[in-house]
Amino acid sequence: MVIPLERLFFSVNRFYPALVGNDIGCGMTLFQTEFNHSKLNLDKIEKKLSEMSDIAPIEWLIDNLPADMQNHPFAHSLGSIGGGNHFAEFQQIDQVINQALFTNSGINKKQLLLLVHSGSRGLGQSILRAHTEQFGHQGLVANTDAANDYLQAHDHALNYAKLNRHLIGHRMMEQIHTQGTVITDVNHNLVEPCELYNQQGWLHRKGATPAHHEIVVIPGSRGDHSYLVKPIISELSLHSLPHGAGRKWMRTECKGRLSHRFTPLQLSRTALGSRIICANKQLIYEEAPQSYKSIETVIESMRSLGLIEVIARLKPVITYKTSGGDSIMLLQFSSAQGPEECCIAVEKTLNYFLTVTEQRQVDVIILEQEPSRYGLKSVLVSLKGAEAKAIAQQWSGTVQWQCTSTLRPKHKRKNWFIGIAYFEPPQEIQDTEILFETMRANGPGGQHVNKTSSAVRATHIATGISVKIQSQRSQHANKKLAKQLIAWHLNHYLSQQQASFNNQRHLAHHRVIRGNATHCFYGREFLPITK
């Protein structure tokens, strides 16, 4: 019998941050909402949740972040789920198994529940990176300055992750016009002091739920049930439980195994009648129910070993992964035909921008750059990642650099301005994404007219371009002609898009508003001015 605890390590005298990993504080929060599931309209809820951005808007964060988190370096990521196996899922009670424990939980069987699985986003990554750059993968001796510094950062990440889950829950419930309260909140990526087998040491958990909570949720895949359980502390399991069903297939295998059997649309509906919101086509295959083990097997293993009491079974209603996938944006930095000092400002701004995008896990590729004598006249970069669009919007506008000219020290001017503009790249259209409809041909003609379904209407899904062909006797020939005609229309469509895009880029080089800057910096060190 195997219990799928992902990683559990007990050590004495020292602990190992690398065993906790980069998502410190990853965990799950269960909310009781005020939404009565008898009023559930899946179409409406799916539409509302699909309209929610993956990244919380700045205005929303300003209104909802605690005062002490407003200027946090990773405030921008709060309220966002992230990738991988993270999710937010509305659920309902499917079966009460232990009535006494269920009554004690205070859960209302008629109300929807919301389970949020997420962590510390880029903050945890930055903490682990700082540790490994200094110490590699060595452990830290307990009670040393280095150990205490890590634990302080670690505990901050735990609090950040908890706040992140609560804000995700707030956003999800707000989107469907309800509110709720927290039933349980549990971290499963952490290190903490622990006594096991009469020995004091450090217990590292990576994907393992602490067993000292009154109730916890053990989720299955998005197409399977979850279980509300009461943990029973046992040294056999190192005071821990699995945090989910566990994978059956590696992520890299999933699309190859499933893409010939299921489309992304088919995978957005489950055998239990629930729905999935996941615009990332790669992720929807990686997280398919088929790639996970059966949750019933996991629950039965734990129950038979005396590690849990099962309280209730939960049924998924709608699972939110991502509404937009990884965005791809283009960002243009321009000196706007300004003097050489503005070109220096472009280069300094780009270097600062690259440090910001690295922290926020957005990939940047420099596509074009036009050098000047001392800096850069302009730069075009592509951004890819969940936060690409949010970053592009935040940086779009005017950048002001306050500094005495290094080239002309006696020059009176001390303010230099550059412009940043963002663009969505011209839409890449696949001519294979065509919906074919067959019908009977009409009008004068031979014996095939009005008797066989030889006519074809072809519609390009991405653009709505539609053509109808019935000139040939065979359906196959009409499909071939329809595809050629669609391709001709698409070439014209793409040419118009590219011309519009080039025109926008050209205008951006001449439009810099000198004032009301979105970002300000000062001095030769190019230090940011906090507004």
Image (cartoon, grey):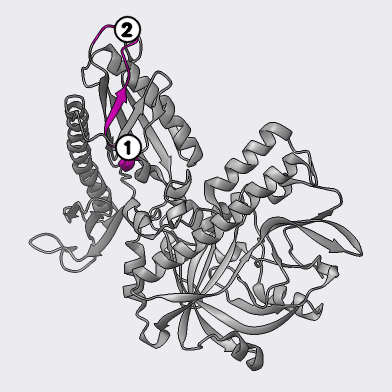
Horizontal and vertical percent position of residue 402: 31, 23
Question: Marks 1 and 2: in contact by CB < 8 Å?
Answer: no
Q: Amino acid at mark 2?
A: Leu
Q: What is the residue that sits farthest to the left in this orientation?
A: 444
Label number found at residue 275: none
Q: Is residue 4 left or right of residue 428?
A: right
At x 43% / y 21%, what residue is drawn? 525
Horizontal and vertical percent position of residue 132: 69, 36
Tell me the magenta residue range: 392-411
Asked if 426 appears above or below 286 in the picture, the reply is above
Element carrying mark 2: loop
Would residue 450 be counted in the magenta stretch?
Answer: no
- Decide which of 20, 253 is in the foreground and name it: 20
Closer to us: mark 2 or mark 1?
Answer: 2
* Residue position marked by numbered label 2 in the rendering: 407
Horizontal and vertical percent position of residue 148: 72, 45
Horizontal and vertical percent position of residue 212: 72, 72
